[in-house]
Every structure is written in structure tokens, then in C-alpha cells.
Amino acid sequence: MALLDVRNLTVRFDTPDGEVQAVSDLSFTMEKGECLGIVGESGSGKSQTFMAAMGLLADNGRATGDVLFGGANLLTAGEKQLNAIRGNKAAMVFQDHMTSLTPHMKVGRQMAEVLVRHRGLSAAAARDAAIAMLKRVQIPDPERRAAMYPHELSGGLRQRVMIAMSLLCHPELLIADEPTTALDVTVQALILDLIREVKEQDRTSVILITHDLGVVAGLADRVAVMYAGRIVELGDVAQIFAAPQHPYTQGLLACTPRLDDVGKVLKTISGQPPNLQRLPPGCAFAPRCPFKIAACAERPPLRPAAGGGLKACARDDIASINRAAS
Amino acid sequence: MWSYLARRVLIGIPTLWAIITVCFFLMRLTPGGPFDSAAPVPPEILANLRARYHLDDPLWQQYLSYLWNLLHWDFGPSFKYKDFTVTELIAQGFPVSFQNGFAAILLAMVIGIPMGIAAALAQNTARDYTVSGIAMTGIVIPNFVMGQLLILIFGVWLKDTAVHLPAGGWNNGAFANRILPVITLALPFVAYLARITRGSMIEVMRANYVRTAKAKGLPFRAVVIHHALKSALTPVVTFLGPATAFILTGSMVVETIFQIPGIGRYFVQGALNRDYTLVMGVTILSAAIMILMNLLVDLLYGVLDPKVRYD
């Protein structure tokens, strides 16, 4: 049985300007020990997919479908059942590392809280375990850091505290939502090493949500590329980087600046992502797609592609066109 | 911390002096005087009175001697209540106003803050609308209407029932006599506190760290109490400081309606009567309380937010 099985997940938000469909009919499965990268630009629904799974949608958001994890359906689970899973079997690290820790509580206590809640440890034992975990994520002088407030720590340290906090109960699934965004590169490398270690040593399954293809290439086993609330391509990381089957994936890869591109103008995908309030009836990427054909007026289903992955594109010759062009 | 406290208290002295100075000259610039009255006073008597209270001395001399007396804790004699010094008047009335005000602000906190939290956690539900409705009513009904209404209900209509309450009077501070005035004083503050708490709680519940707390699997109650409440109370404390200073010095309207011997009426009567020393006395008192409350608020910020440091 898959560790995580998402079926027909749809996430809608009621806004003053009308309903926004952030995630549309999304389905995928994930096996134990796997690292799945979720790639897409802002507004593609990659974060909201997992906010919905963890029951963390904003008040105006609603999710339908099924998210099966450890024998429970997270979307229909009661508050109690959900709280027994969150922070315990499934933990999440957020991208807003500067504001994700409670400002008026010492970080050691914020961490200890998790163990008191899920493991029933005493405050003292939980504190010791929290300090041990801070040591494990290579925070120097962990005893002293545990007695500090978040504002006394740098951004990188705060994100490491967040990761340490998420690992306290040895979760089966770690969801890392843009864990390295807005951190400087050395800290980014540290955080990514940490996630790799967790994945390889603890056999923790990791979902890595990012817009940074480099991060995905280094860590993920499989990648799902999202566009306008849907998966447009899903496959092994090597396969997708070598022979992307969807024009959007191609575009993303082409946009990544390379060191040997000195002096060239940066590539972009022309056009804008669609308005999620008024999605076009057909392929959402069609208005920006250079390979658009008549069939694109109808929404392409996610179907098997050459190389063993899945793609949501009406055409089968994208990879070969791409190879011919480069 | 202690040096911060000492510094703040010291800064209070020039502040107070500035207020005293402005108030002193404003009062003297106001047309009329303490001995003007409808019935003409014979010029000889008036001359004697003016001499007795040194009103014929040059203004700067009066100002300096007032300051000199203040330094010796002498607020001077009242011009209107001729057998009393200002110190005596305040010593009689202030404890009454203080007790009522303190009870009212406590009541307002105990009711208003939980009401605001309850509304925020059930945003846009019947519970929320009920709280907003009550708050709006509390704000728009002036206390002279509310006071009369309470008297009408508990003092007149329910006169022969067990919940009958005295319509006014102080009765040496009997508990029953305090209930209606304290409620009247508290109601608008219940309303303001409920509104402020609701607004800030709604904002804090959307904060990223509240989301983190939820993602940790903490029960909702623990999320609210341990992670949201402290931050949400910051604007509440900001409001409570000046509000407390205001309410502790009595309310002319409420004390008049319920015939309570507090100092609230001295603010208005003193100014109308040109009772120079009495006006100065109550002004200095309320300014000092205001300065104190502001200091208290700044200290409370430090309790609520570890980023606030005193050095």
C-alpha cells in the first residue's frame, strides 16, 4: 500500500472576487522511503495541495477528494485523529522561516511541546530530547539556543529549528514547503544535506515543494510538475530532466540559468499563468504553448508518456521536437 | 530594567511640570474669575477675597508660589469649597472614584476580552455577530442614557423584587450601591475591549506561527492559549493603559446620575467655577495617573513580547 494516496483532490477558496480553484482534481501516490519533488511556479497549487492534506487551509478554503495516509483519510478525519497524525507521523516545514516560530516562546519549549503532546514525555525529558535533536541538525551550542527566543536566532538557524522540530517524532512523512527559499546559499546547502540525511538514514519519505529545479535534481527520486492546480508531468527525476515530455516542463528547464550562458539574455516562458477564477476549458498551458494544436482545446488527461512517466499533453512528439531544437 | 524604570519616572517630572504650566496659564487666560457670581459682591469684599487668595499679585509670582507650594505637597485651598483644601477634596473623592473605576475596568476585562476571543474563534457565525452587536450597542449608547436605563429597570420597575438595586446614593460604599454605577462605567469598555480583542485575535490566528502550532498536532485550545493569546493581547494592553487612567479618575456623568461623591464632578465644576486650585489639583492627579499607566503599559509589552528590551 502506498504511504500517501491522493485522489481527486480539489481545493477551492472563497474570495471577495469569487471562487478560486487552487488545486483541480489532483491524484498521485507516493511510496515509503521515496522523495517526491513538487515543482511549479507561485500559484500553481503546490503548497495548497499539502496544506489541504494537513488540514491547514485558511478559513475560506475547502478541500474535496481523498488524502489517504496511514489508513486514515486526512480530509474527513476529525480534529482529534488529525492532531494525532500531525507533528507525529506526518510533519511539515514551512517556507516562512522568519515567522513560523511563535515569537514569545523559547524555541526549546516549542520543540518540547511536540514530544509532550505525542509521546507523553515529561517536560524535562522532552527538553533533553529537543536539545539532542538540535545537536543532530548541527546547531552549535544547543543548550543555549534552546533557551533563546526565535528573534535571537538567524534565519538559517530558525529553519534548522523548524526541521529539528518536525523530526522529533521520527515522522514517516516530512513535507518540506520551500525549505530553502530566502536563505543564503551556504545555509541552503546545509538544509538540503539535512533533508538528504533524514531521507537516507531514517528512511523518512520526503515531499519537497520548491520552484528551484536544482534542489529537486539533487534530492528527489520522482518529480511532479504542477501548473494551474494540476499535475502536468510526473516521472523519475532523471527522465524528466533528460527528456521532458510536457512543453511547460521544457520551458521551466530552459529558463534555468546556466553558468556557461554568460552574456545571453535569460529565457522566459512568454505569457502569464492563467487566472484561477477563469480557467480555460482546455489545456491551461495552451495559451502560452508554442506547440499548441487543435486538440488542446480539450483538457488532456494525465496519461502514460514515453520513458515511464505521466504527462498531461495532447501531443506525443514534444520530446523529439525539443531534442531537434537543441 | 531598574535604570529604565528610574529614567521613565524621572522623565515624568518635566512632563508633569509642562502640564502644570500649560494648565495654570490656560485657566488664568480664561475670562471670568472664581468670585464672579450672579449676585453682585460688594467691591470691598471682593478686594478682600482677591487679596486673601493673592489674585492681585503679578501672575508670574502666583505661578512661582504655586509651584513652590506644590513642592511642599500643598495644592492650596479650594476657591469654591471654602472650608476645604484641594488635598482634602481629592483625598475624600478620589478613593471612591478609584474603587469604582478599578472595579469597572476589571469587569470590562473579565467580560470584554473573553467575548472578543470567543467571537474571533467563530468568525462570521451567529456567535460572532452577537458579540459584534453587543459591542456596537455598548459603544453607541452614551453612559447617561445607559445609567438612566439601568436605574429605570433595577431601581424602578424591579423595585419590589429580589433584584432591586438602589437608584443612586453612595451609602458609605455599600455593595448594592456600587453595582449599577460600576456596570454603567464598564459597559462601553466591555464593548471596546471585545472589538479590539476580536480584531487582533483574528489577525493572530492567521499568523504563520499559529499554523506551525496546528501542524504540530496541538489541540486547538493549546494553540489558542499558548501560541496566539499573548500576541493578540498587545493591542488590548495598548488600549487598557489610557482607558484605565481615564476611568480611575471618575466620570462626571456617572457620578452625577448615581449621586456618588467621587472626583469626576470636580473636573467640570472646577472649570465652570474657575476654581483654579481645584482644577489644577485634579489635572495633576489625572496626568500623574496617565504617566504611570503608560509606564505600566510599556512594562507589560515586555511581558508579552520578548523582543521588547529595557535598556
Image (cartoon, coloured by chain):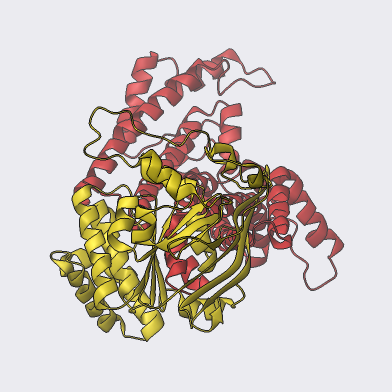
- How many numbered dots are placed on residues in this image? 0
A271, above or below B227, in the image: above
- Dividing the picture into quadrants, the one containing residue A120 is bottom left
Residue A208: x and y, percent?
38, 61
- Residue name at image x 28 percent, y 42 percent: B8
- Dividing the picture into quadrants, the one containing residue B74 is top left
Q: Colour of chain A?
A: yellow
> Which is nearer the eye, A154 or B127?
A154
Task: Tell me if A194 is positioned left or right of B235 in this view.
Answer: left
> Which is nearer the eye, A163 or A294?
A294
Task: Tell me if A313 is positioned left or right of B3 in this view.
Answer: right
Residue B95: x and y, percent?
50, 54
Task: Tell me if B27 is positioned left or right of A160 in this view.
Answer: right
- Residue name at image x 13 percent, y 66 percent: A141
- Residue name at image x 59 percent, y 78 percent: A78
Q: Colour of chain B?
A: red
Residue A245: x and y, percent?
46, 53
Query: The C terminus of chain A lies in which quarter of the figure?
Result: top left
Residue B41: x and y, percent?
63, 18
- Residue name at image x 42 percent, y 36 percent: B284
Task: Tell me if A192 is positioned left or right of A278 in this view.
Answer: left
Q: Residue furthest left?
A: A141
| Residue A106 showing in the rendered view | no
> Which is nearer the eye, A205 or A302?
A302
A93, above or below B295, in the image: below
A267, above or below B43, in the image: below
| Residue A197 showing in the rendered view | yes
> Which is nearer the eye, B93 or A282?
A282
